[in-house]
Amino acid sequence: MKTAKLLLHCPDRPGILAEVTDFITVNKGNIVYLDQHVDHVENIFFMRIEWELESFLVPQEKIHDYFATLYAQKYGMEFRLYFSDYTPRMAIFVSKMSHCLYDLLARYSAGEWNVHIPLIISNHPDLEPVAKRFEIPFYVFPITKENKLEQERRELELLEEHRVNFIVLARYMQVVSEQLIDAFPNRIINIHHSFLPAFVGAKPYHAAFERGVKIIGATSHYVTTNLDAGPIIEQDVARITHKDTVQDLVNKGKDLEKIVLSRAVQKHIERKILTYKNKTVIFS
Amino acid sequence: MKTAKLLLHCPDRPGILAEVTDFITVNKGNIVYLDQHVDHVENIFFMRIEWELESFLVPQEKIHDYFATLYAQKYGMEFRLYFSDYTPRMAIFVSKMSHCLYDLLARYSAGEWNVHIPLIISNHPDLEPVAKRFEIPFYVFPITKENKLEQERRELELLEEHRVNFIVLARYMQVVSEQLIDAFPNRIINIHHSFLPAFVGAKPYHAAFERGVKIIGATSHYVTTNLDAGPIIEQDVARITHKDTVQDLVNKGKDLEKIVLSRAVQKHIERKILTYKNKTVIFS
Amino acid sequence: MKTAKLLLHCPDRPGILAEVTDFITVNKGNIVYLDQHVDHVENIFFMRIEWELESFLVPQEKIHDYFATLYAQKYGMEFRLYFSDYTPRMAIFVSKMSHCLYDLLARYSAGEWNVHIPLIISNHPDLEPVAKRFEIPFYVFPITKENKLEQERRELELLEEHRVNFIVLARYMQVVSEQLIDAFPNRIINIHHSFLPAFVGAKPYHAAFERGVKIIGATSHYVTTNLDAGPIIEQDVARITHKDTVQDLVNKGKDLEKIVLSRAVQKHIERKILTYKNKTVIFS
Amino acid sequence: MKTAKLLLHCPDRPGILAEVTDFITVNKGNIVYLDQHVDHVENIFFMRIEWELESFLVPQEKIHDYFATLYAQKYGMEFRLYFSDYTPRMAIFVSKMSHCLYDLLARYSAGEWNVHIPLIISNHPDLEPVAKRFEIPFYVFPITKENKLEQERRELELLEEHRVNFIVLARYMQVVSEQLIDAFPNRIINIHHSFLPAFVGAKPYHAAFERGVKIIGATSHYVTTNLDAGPIIEQDVARITHKDTVQDLVNKGKDLEKIVLSRAVQKHIERKILTYKNKTVIFS
């Protein structure tokens, strides 16, 4: 059943929820999902609503216009509208480690997600055989300090050519630069192998071992120009002991990383994430 | 700020949410909380809404009537209405172990909960000193097979006399009988020291040890006439290993039990639980 | 560095640990791992010890004999001896779901485990393309009530032919019969999609949904002739809410299943599991 | 049954474990616990062993001397020896929040721990009624920048007078100074209300809220002169969502704090902790 998904936020005022649900109900849309949240500190109203389009009286191509005219202006809303029959296009960036890539491709290949993966990009050739197994085009752009901006420009062209909507950094061991981030604002998902904000930057497992923590973590977040400081989407942790070596942390961490990354990608694909002031609202 | 809390469920139909929120908004109630859920299998709509009464145009004592007349009949709703200035009255039943009792009383004593505890009932005198420390009346009703119904009748009188609204079985090692359950339907909260439905009945830690599980659990639930089979409110688990003896499980389990019980009691006090078909809806 | 791994258990008596470590030290073996456990209820001593063979004075092929003669008889020990340069051979059984299979093969393919996978067996052809991607022979044995024993006999021949040491049931939706279990005692690892002993048998997610639990789980265990009742190796859980449908449980459960199964397989490959009286000792 | 507990660490060399267990076995000590760990990076051997003294041939008062002479010198060991019939004496420092204090006293009062609590010290009078309930002397030392060192000197006298062995900071909202730390090296246990090393210092829940993390934590550690940077004993976490306010984090955190602190205190009382290079070895 084809549906529309609407995500919005605006200054909180009485009646918004009633008006928006009323708009859909009155026009014979069958609401199949509704979740809302009020941030009482910032006084912001957040909402996600999904309804079936079959009997909806407003034609699909006019919903955006109608909604903008009738409500968005009135309430100072920002909103995004998605339709279930559109399949977003996702690029994966990798380096040398395969665990996150396999986890993404296994789900993709099993048809778990409404997504298309037109290409994989890497700064190393190592994972080309994995891409081949899943028959996905694989492009290598070796990165040095000198060629980084130029290589990224070529990557951007490729991403545009493949009409990519969002990017997943699946243990891509490069800091991406501002031009790439600006082209995909809140649409680059990274997995950092620590419980942020602990152990920002390189070699977090070594740092965790050094500090003697009893729990390690992984964090998926949208990439912003501040390193490892973007809006957090999902985190999880695993218990360790004094018996664990750095290599044990790396191994245990792999399972965390792949699961935490895939959960974030899934939420993104399902259009369940709103970002606001460097934080995320994750709808149920 | 005084508020009203409304919990309801009814067959799902378009427009309920809009109508209910409209009723409050139109009458100048400021909505401070809203959560809803649709069970698409049973086709039931669940909702919890809370609003400030200060400027609300419907007088507090008439809200119930108005709502019943205007909406409950129309939609076939069951609903409950609570006001924040009413403090519910909770009785605690205990036997010999003090960990859950202390945890409840520590929170009560620190003023964490909007609740009054007029009495503690036990089938043993052991915990009377704890009750004394917190200056709460303590009543002992020794239970045997023969006197159980008679003792419970006396307990019921005492509960009525103290105008008790709900009961917490804080490791009360007796099966309560139908007369008590019928007097407090979905208003007796028990803590069972296993991950239900595993290890129903007596000595669950021994059974868990025997089976060689790697994780133990605790479950808080409303008491029904089927032993350990009532609607589950909250569960949590802890990891164990082959090194743990039965006594280790008992000790680790204590922390689970007290936290899982207190979380359930808190949700109950906050009016965040709806029960339906032997399950709970726990609002956020 | 080549090592020997020795796992043993016997009635507990003073001096065993000292004698065994002494045997290795005196013969110039460098101990790199030692863990022991005493079950004070059953009075059984369990031990796992690993040492480097480079300077060890007892020739590799004679260690078993020496140890049997010098200690096993004296203490009534059962013991197993493994060498790090032997790569065990593992068969995977699957049906239609790919998530566990992908997780196993991704680790295998990345060289994470010291194991060889000579074949995959299934009762359905669905996952043949996955096997092909990883270039592993795939055999289909459709199972009916009537042909089960005969098909298993053919599977057993194939397993023998490929010199398979142990079997992993990666969501293999068939009960394996006694002849297969007897041929691989404590060497068939299954993943059950519930927190055992809760929800034994078919459709555990449906049963969990029906019961209204707040946490779901997965359990890996060795297969015995009692359904879902063999020695538990590893368990893990995930939190759910009233908002989760049966399908949500299935999806969340998949991540649990693959991780819990892979952890068990890893422990098995690393020779870290001893079984005793339908329980496991999992060395650190 | 009276036991001796020996904790030691020294440079790793072959034969230490065999020699130490041999010393106990030969002298007819019945070993009831043994755990060891080798840090292969630092090449340090750690060990904890416990044995019954009833038939032990070395008199209790001479064990320390014998062990020092026979082994400690030879292997360059540091070791500590404890006897089960000695009850350590613990002081609690608090400020205004009662949840950790209640949790400690509830366990103490139920006889769960082999410890004596001769006094509670606070910089505020607020929790005196709690101390009174449990009949424990309560001393108030208001702290200002100016009087801090002087007040601590008076506290130290009091601690000495009460022969206190170790201190528990149960949400004591003051940084303790070097003189107190030096008097109790690795014997002051603090609870920090964050997942260290994230959110060091004041107001960690506010910082966690600001950063938008999806999981909060608590950390118990030994106090050193570097703020919140001492050896970590225990950590645990709880999941939060965008719906949680700072106050919700504070409330959820309380349960974490008290459990994580009590686990650390229990491990300390049971003599299961060794510290080395700003890390802990926590024996099983």
Image (cartoon, coloured by chain):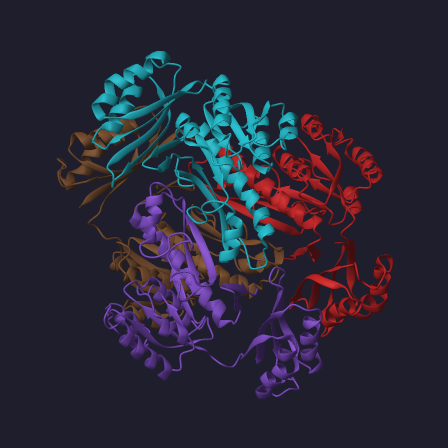
Chain colours: A brown, B cyan, C purple, D red
Query: What is the tally of numbered marks visible in this picture?
Result: 0
Quadrant location of the C terminus of chain A in the rendered image:
top left
The quadrant holding residue C284 is bottom right
In the rendered image, residue C132, in percent from the top left (x then y), is placed at 29, 74
Where is residue C38 drawn, in percent x and y? Answer: 63, 63
In terms of depth relative to the viewer, which is nearer, C268 or B123?
B123
Residue A127 sits in quarter: bottom left
Horizontal side, residue D56 vs residue C173: left or right: right
Camera sees residue A171: no
**Where residue C222 appears, x then y in whole percent?**
44, 66
Indicate whether D237 appears above or below C99: above
Q: In the image, what residue occupies the spot 36% across and 52% down?
A: C252
Q: Is residue C27 left or right of residue A117?
A: right
For image coordinates 68% across by 75% down, the residue present is C21
User: Percent x, y for residue D162?
Assistant: 82, 38
Q: Nearer the viewer, residue D281 or A90?
A: D281
Which residue is at a point 33% across and 51% down the rendered structure image?
C205
Residue A19 vertical position relative to residue B220 in the rendered view, above or below: above
Residue B262 in view of the camera = yes
Query: Residue B267 versus residue A112: which sits nearer the camera?
Result: B267
Q: Is residue B172 shown left or right of residue B10?
A: right
